[in-house]
Image (cartoon, grey):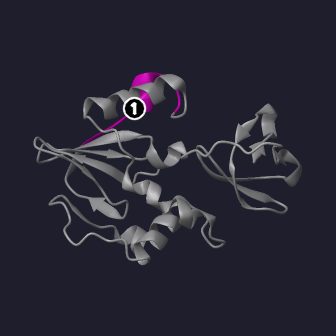
Amino acid sequence: MKDKAYGTNTPAYLRRAGRPTYLHFDTGLGERADFEVVTPRTALSDFVPSRLWLPYGVWKLKDGSEVIFSRDYFPMWGISEDRVQRLAPWLWINGIVDQSHFWKAGGGNWTSSSVREMAISQLAAYRIFELPRLIDVMPQLFEADVDSIEDGVRRLYAAGRRDTALPSYAELNTRVLG
């Protein structure tokens, strides 16, 4: 689909057609009037929405490790002296002593090119070149009763995609899982 609202011409995934039409944009879930969405004549390239892979900030922990988190404040990557670990999005991170965001340092909003480049550079500095586990939520985002990334994470967890061993600084996020 193409989103034509506000003079844009950006790709989006169709979640549900109708009035309103529900879409999955690069920056998250949203809705448009049916006349603001068009089906292109040729198929668009698939994309992984930035909301699921682009970091928003970094938590520094008491033990000196760091956790890179998403725009929705879900953990993505755990970084310690000896390893980088993909983290499950349903974890609650304990021992946060500092928090920083890429958008403050970059002078633009989360989706601006300078902030995006800064976040990608940070991933490269940690030698992170794969996608975080948060992208596994994507199929759940097309289910009828899923209205947020958090709903999708809850659904993904319920589907049985759990780790048995949690990092020492994490526990299950009961705010998300109920």
Magenta span contains residue 114 = no
Residue at image point 30% right, 56% down: 87
| Residue situated furthest front in the rendering | 42
Residue at image point 79% right, 58% down: 21
Place of residue 82 in the rendered image (x, y in percent of width and height, measured from the top left): 10, 43
Front-lying residue, 121 or 92:
121
Front-lying residue, 42 or 91:
42
Quarter where residue 54 is shown? top left
Q: Is residue 106 above or below residue 126?
A: above
Highlighted range, magenta:
98-109
Q: Is residue 146 left or right of residue 7?
A: left
CA neighbours of label 1 inside 10 A, class few (<14), some (14 to 19), many (20+): many
Q: Which residue is tagged 1?
A: 119
The quadrant of the picture occupied by the C terminus is bottom left
| Residue situated furthest right in the rendering | 35
Residue at image point 39% right, 69% down: 175
Place of residue 85 in the rendered image (x, y in percent of width and height, measured from the top left): 23, 51
Q: Give, as a three-letter code, the residue at label 1.
A: Ala
For the question of whether residue 81 can be seen, the reply is yes
Q: Is residue 106 left or right of residue 47?
A: left
Q: Secondary structure at mark 1?
A: helix
Place of residue 5 in the rendered image (x, y in percent of width and height, measured from the top left): 80, 40
Q: Is residue 46 above or below residue 164?
A: above
Magenta span contains residue 101 = yes
Place of residue 59 in the rendered image (x, y in percent of width and height, measured from the top left): 28, 44
Q: Is residue 65 above or below residue 100?
A: below
For the question of whether residue 71 can be seen, the reply is no
Q: Count the marks.
A: 1
